[in-house]
Image (cartoon, coloured by chain):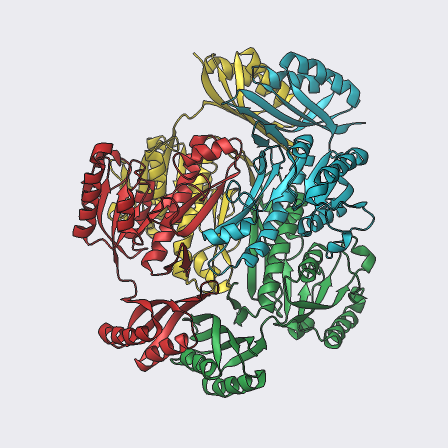
Chain colours: A green, B red, C cyan, D yellow
Amino acid sequence: MSRSYTLVIDCPDRPGIVYSVSRIIFENDGNILESRQFEDRETGRFFLRVVFESGCDQAVLADAVATLGEGFDMDWKLVPTNQPVKVLILVSKFDHCLAHLLYKVRIGEIPIEIVGIASNHPAAALTATDIRDIPFHHLPVTPDTKAQQEASIKALVKDSGAELVVLARYMQILSDDLAAHLSGRCINIHHSFLPSFKGAKPYHQAHAHGVKMIGATAHYVTADLDEGPIIHQGVESVTHEDSPDDLIRKGREVENQVLGQAVAWHVAHRVIRNGRKTVVFKG
Amino acid sequence: MSRSYTLVIDCPDRPGIVYSVSRIIFENDGNILESRQFEDRETGRFFLRVVFESGCDQAVLADAVATLGEGFDMDWKLVPTNQPVKVLILVSKFDHCLAHLLYKVRIGEIPIEIVGIASNHPAAALTATDIRDIPFHHLPVTPDTKAQQEASIKALVKDSGAELVVLARYMQILSDDLAAHLSGRCINIHHSFLPSFKGAKPYHQAHAHGVKMIGATAHYVTADLDEGPIIHQGVESVTHEDSPDDLIRKGREVENQVLGQAVAWHVAHRVIRNGRKTVVFKG
Amino acid sequence: MSRSYTLVIDCPDRPGIVYSVSRIIFENDGNILESRQFEDRETGRFFLRVVFESGCDQAVLADAVATLGEGFDMDWKLVPTNQPVKVLILVSKFDHCLAHLLYKVRIGEIPIEIVGIASNHPAAALTATDIRDIPFHHLPVTPDTKAQQEASIKALVKDSGAELVVLARYMQILSDDLAAHLSGRCINIHHSFLPSFKGAKPYHQAHAHGVKMIGATAHYVTADLDEGPIIHQGVESVTHEDSPDDLIRKGREVENQVLGQAVAWHVAHRVIRNGRKTVVFKG
Amino acid sequence: MSRSYTLVIDCPDRPGIVYSVSRIIFENDGNILESRQFEDRETGRFFLRVVFESGCDQAVLADAVATLGEGFDMDWKLVPTNQPVKVLILVSKFDHCLAHLLYKVRIGEIPIEIVGIASNHPAAALTATDIRDIPFHHLPVTPDTKAQQEASIKALVKDSGAELVVLARYMQILSDDLAAHLSGRCINIHHSFLPSFKGAKPYHQAHAHGVKMIGATAHYVTADLDEGPIIHQGVESVTHEDSPDDLIRKGREVENQVLGQAVAWHVAHRVIRNGRKTVVFKG
């Protein structure tokens, strides 16, 4: 029986990569359903995402890719298409992004298994969201207990088997240590159009500046706060009539969509890191 | 010396197409720079656009593709990348799309050679546009002379060697005969968000309907008026304060961009017809 | 103690309206906080929305407006600003718009009191939404029971005191009788960019047409199905890669935002009917 | 005979302003056609733009407003609606914004009289633009001659009677002195989404940052470079495939529209400065 696989590759560019990959697929009884590629001419790096059907076992296919990968010095992964990704969500008091993600997961729009929700506030603070039976972890934090609280987060990630951590308006600044620990497997939604208005209260900064558009940015967390590789951005027009509270209200919609889209692309293996940037094969 | 080629293919889908194409490129000393593909699962048709560098002659490459193409029942074309396309522009009194296209061509943004401009109005009507030494053809038309005028257009297309005809707000309805004659090599900008408001005075129709957005649609001309395959669409918000004249003014910007983008994609061989639809590998 | 009132007026245009209204407010110890107006030059009708603070009783102010209104042949309403509006929501199986509205209401973003939810499906069908203690009414319908079911809806509107009925993807076609009964106090979200693709399965129609953008339209329900005055519209780009299911997925976001925005404007008394169109004083 | 006037006012907010203004208009045989107002609750300042018809002389109306203005401590101006504004355009080598503005002026879309074009490059550099008989001033500049060149610009503004100076991608940094001299009557288009990427080569900065949207900002020039009050902003999506040259190409469209819109609003007296921000009564 045939099933669908997603293969993602990045390696130094040189002639023959597509030929070699397509030969492996062809020779393993496969048929390519989707393929997207990108060559970064500045760095000479090549990126490829292929979705194909094959009757072969995943192990057989993985062996073939591994052999090829050595020759081309490839980073690669091969996963069954639409295999659910285990996700841990961190949140503070504003739960709109959480509610938006939960809805998408519950109707089956994004292949995600939510393995837990953690917050520095108690569950009772998430008044508008319906947690149901998702494990909830209250991890309060003070300046004195920060190291310990972050150790709890690390343990939670490990114990839950989370492959991705989503900071869904988690209003705590991660230590460099935790940021580095989660690097590449943690998506944050920043409530501004980065790199404008980094830091605290970006909507108030935007209002004081008199900008005519506000935005939101989904990016991978790295040790460099608010500077990790950007996955997606969105904007919304504002006017002189909009108060900071209006910006916050309009921002919620943008944050929901930008984070929801970034997470959906990530779990479909459409996002590949490219130094301080990303390659995003949009779906 | 190596140069860049663009290869565009469409054929019935079956395993091995990408493998075979990439093998030809690899064996002819080529390196793939860009590749986009699409399989229409409804119709089973496969579409591929590959940009590659090779030191081989175009004729040698074309022979290799031709041989492959017979085996796969392919429609294909192979052209040097960025080779200018000969374009004839038809226009009436509103010359904003014409002016916008001319600017792009003159600064080298789109690889086009404008072989002529034809209008049912005299050159003097295009008061805001700078025709310079582009051959201008005044082809007035009345109900009685329509057949004859369209014969002149056909002759102009033939004599000028035009590969593409752009109807840049050409306000005459083409006869079925001329539409069929130009089918697939003629792009029209319709000043509405099709399929809404087909026919005459779409902005007045939109105003009367009280819609909150207007749009423009670039599509290939076919015998079925206002129904040819859509290449690109754009919209702009409008309000109760906008009069029909305001819609016309806002519409100019949308028309400029939608037509300019559609033509740019077409001459980069990024648009492939797929029945009554198009496949557009956006750049 | 001073409080805020919202006054909405429409009447035949003639000199002195703004002067007279602002005099009443001035003479009743008021201060104008916001004011928006529109004169429809085609019909000669004038529309005004004023938010003002005053220390006077609502009854005193209403008397003054009423007296003025007779002289100018005004339709008018005067309400305390942000007074919650009683809303009944009708829904079928797709509950994204419902979930989106409930979230906004629960965090206090829109001043609404939801007096009930009614559906032709049982509550168990709304698997992703958290109804809590909102009265839920299962009103199944068959061709044979339609008249009776609609009578139940009418009764529900009456008994619940609903001032507004929201069709949040309620997939039943209202009879002319019910549509007329709810005319002007019922907002529907149509999942297409009207007037394109009226009727059933608009996303499938859009896909078959090969359009490059899909949209959603919020409009008042009138006896003329899918033709009531449009309040708001939104769009989203789509590509040849999007299947009908992808259009449905992308459409959910647009529907959520367009309906949410239309309802928010309605309950803030920012929308005034103007024949088959609307005047929308956006906030 | 009745004609249309535009009255723009800003002053400290207090009860009775609208009443007093509308009384003047009413008592001078006027009828209000449009009115927009804004109260800045942070600063307590009030802004009003009224378009009205009246049979009275401008001098009579101005006297009435002046008297009122003293009582309310108003800044005000009263101008015949659509009276052409004299504009001087400064440009360097990139002439797309210039070409776009000229087109709009020539078809009568914006009520502007272009009194001159000045550039630090010779006219021959503007290869794609059709200057016609507009006075062109070549004002070359080197670090040594900057003071002298700016003196020439000042003289040009004075001699031409320019009411507005438009920096249409003028790539020279104005001295603090010239910036202050032109403050409030000079609009610049900055080719980034300010406050991101101030300074030189913003598209290259954006590319290096890996942002997913680029933008443009039209703002009033003040002594604080790239920080003057923002009038309008626009954005365009970009992807990993876009090179810096692609960003420049996509940026041209955004710059054209943002600058064109900002200038159109300015000359319609729809923009009022509010400290470091603007109030924009969009048309």
Q: Residue furthest front?
A: C144
Residue C179 rendering spot, x and y as whole percentages: 66, 34
Q: Is residue C211 left or right of residue B101?
A: right
Residue B22 rendering spot, x and y as whole percentages: 37, 77
User: How many numbered discs sit on the rendered protein?
Assistant: 0
> In the image shown, does C110 or A102 lie closer to the viewer?
A102
Residue B123: image quadrant is top left
> In the image shown, does D38 or A113 lie closer to the viewer?
A113
Residue C274 rendering spot, x and y as whole percentages: 58, 27
The image quadrant where one finds the N terminus of chain D is top left
> In the image shown, does B198 or C104 lie closer to the viewer?
B198
Q: Residue furthest left?
A: B159
Residue at 75% across, 71% down:
A153
Residue B158 rendering spot, x and y as whole percentages: 18, 52
Q: Is residue A247 left or right of residue A283?
A: right
Q: Is residue B19 visible?
A: yes
